[in-house]
Amino acid sequence: MSMLDVLDRLEQLELLKSAELWMDYRKLRNVLTHEYPDNREEILEGIQVALKVFHEMKGVQSSMRKYVKK
């Protein structure tokens, strides 16, 4: 399965609100982990976005843990 297929399935199971949004989070991760230190503005912007979505990601993790326990 492709990552998009996995995310679509998680969305069907109501463990994710949006597969597309999660793909955006993956792109953000790539920016944060693959940018060079001299691109400071883009890294800072990425960190700010990551901080904004942290609670949503933590909620997804919690939902998945509950699902697995069932």
Image (spheres, grey):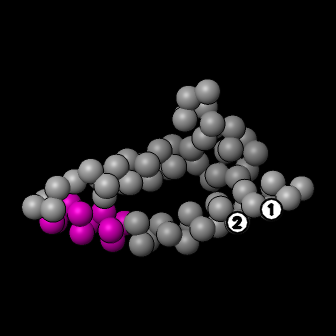
Q: Residue furthest left?
A: 38
* x 81%, y 55%: residue: 67
Does 20 sit above or below residue 48? above
* x 40%, y 66%: residue: 50
- Residue 24, image x, y percentages: 43, 48
Q: Which mark is residue 53?
A: none
Q: Is residue 64 left or right of residue 41?
A: right
State the residue position of label 1. Answer: 66
Quadrant of the rendered structure where residue 7 is? Answer: top right
* x 89%, y 56%: residue: 70
* Label 2 Cα neighbours within 10 Å, binned few <14 / some 14-19 / many ≥20: few
What's under tag 2, amino acid-wise? Ser
Magenta region: 40-49
* x 63%, y 53%: residue: 17
Q: Where's the N terminus, which quadrant?
A: top right
State the residue position of label 2. Answer: 62
Give the spatial CA distance, label 1 vs label 2.
Answer: 6 Å
